[in-house]
Image: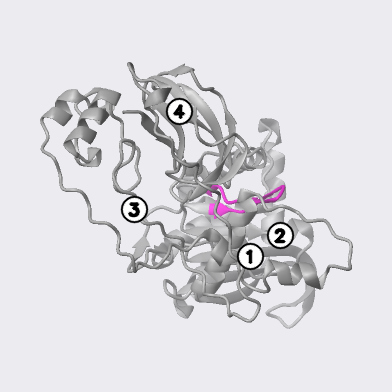
Amino acid sequence: MPTEILMPALSPTMEEGTLAKWLVKEGDTVKSGDIMAEIETDKATMEFEAVDEGVIGKILISEGSEGVKVNTPIAVLLAEGESADDISEAPKPAAPKAEAPKPDAAPAPATPATTAAPAPSAGTSSDGARIFASPLARRIAADKGLDLGTLTGSGPHGRIVKADVEAASAAPKPAAASATAAPAAAPAAAMATGPATDTVLKMYADRPFTEVKLDGMRKTIAARLTEAKQSVPHFYLRRDIRLDALLKFRSQLNKDLESRGVKLSVNDFIIKACALALQQVPAANAVWAGDRTLQFDKSDVAVAVAIEGGLFTPVLRDAETKTLSALSAEMKDLAKRARERKLAPGEYQGGSFAISNLGMFGIDNFDAIINPPHAAILAVGAGVAKPIVGEDGQVTVGTLMSVTLSVDHRVIDGALGANLLQAIKDNLENPIAMLA
């Protein structure tokens, strides 16, 4: 029987995407590994490879289609001996329409989007993962009522082949989901706070404006930050950090490193200081995991990078072990590829701690929103010359940088957060010690 090709999940958090471009057409023959399409996620455009051989019998989703849910059939693959006549006509899945809340209705609290597990099919397991199986193995499995997700393949790279299916016994079909199950919450629900779209349009009907369509990245940012602000119990710790010693040390280092083409930024020192602080206060190097916390051995620090239309948070892994020059080079590379939208998902997912630096934009101080499941984020303002009262009571002028540590109270209590911020401050005010 013809095999449905499903919209893939190209990252752990992907729920929907845009089918940007088909690189094959109906009637084309493909084999495993061939690039069939380009798919836009909320962060990047990625190539989608075929996992089976066959002929493209029908394209179900046209290129340019947005909001295509993961595991939605996007095309049909025909095996040897099959033709387009074998494809049963089925209506194309309609794009979901977000229902605007009634003007007087209170918005529902945002919750992480969940999806009911799909029934096992020829191309996915019960948890939605792709299954590598030959077309013949799939046909036999369908005839025997077997769930391919329960089988272990003996073919190349774990591929399920005819012998694996013939040796297996039919498994009972999973029970249908309860009709009373709560509907899945879509990312749009997290954005549906405030007045309904129609209400806002009527409010400004007599004013000229341009509607700006939300792309996948902006939708995801809106949903995740709404969820984070509503569900994460933030509290904030603020300190001023004196930068005079760091600026002097940085100037000397850059002069010594000039022949190697290395130029360290203040942000490079901040990354290093935070990475070391997470080692000095290991209980704060953790993330929230629903019913537990995960405490890490290494310091994986995410750094916010502004790009057109949104931002990325690439992660510098094992940052505590890297030299300042290595951190600087890696950060420059990650930032460059982030702006080009060429980062792989593994390069911007993960980490336990984040840094958001708006000092270069002249911002003195601000409060950042935690990016779940991180336990904290450091908001960094500009270094500003200010009068400082010394220990001897004399007033001098020094460069002070205001920082705010946003903390998830489920993971880090007040005293622990204060210890972490003190360690960051000590590292930045004694930069030579960071090299010891």
Q: How many marks?
A: 4
Instruction: Identify the magenta region.
Output: 302-315
Task: Give the crowd class for mark 2: few <14, some 14-19, many >=20 residues within 10 Å.
Answer: some
* Amino acid at the residue labelled 2: Leu
- What residue is disc 2 on? 358
Between tags 1 and 3, which lies in front? 3
* Amino acid at the residue labelled 1: Ala
* Amino acid at the residue labelled 3: Ala
Chain-order first, disc 3 or disc 4: 4
Image disc number at residue 243: none
* Distance Cα–Cα, label 2 vs label 4: 39 Å
| Residue 104 appears left or right of 212 | left
Q: Are marks 1 and 2 in contact (CB under 8 Å)?
A: yes
Between tags 3 and 2, which lies in front? 3
Where residue 8 appears, as percent x and y from the top left, is 44, 39
Q: Are marks 1 and 4 in contact (CB under 8 Å)?
A: no
- Is residue 270 visible from the viewing direction of this image? no
Chain-order first, disc 1 or disc 3: 3
- 66 and 177: which one is in front? 177
Chain-order first, disc 3 or disc 2: 3
* Distance Cα–Cα, label 3 vs label 4: 23 Å
Chain-order first, disc 1 or disc 4: 4
Image disc number at residue 49: 4
* Distance Cα–Cα, label 1 vs label 2: 8 Å
- Is residue 303 visible from the viewing direction of this image? yes
- What residue is disc 1 on? 379
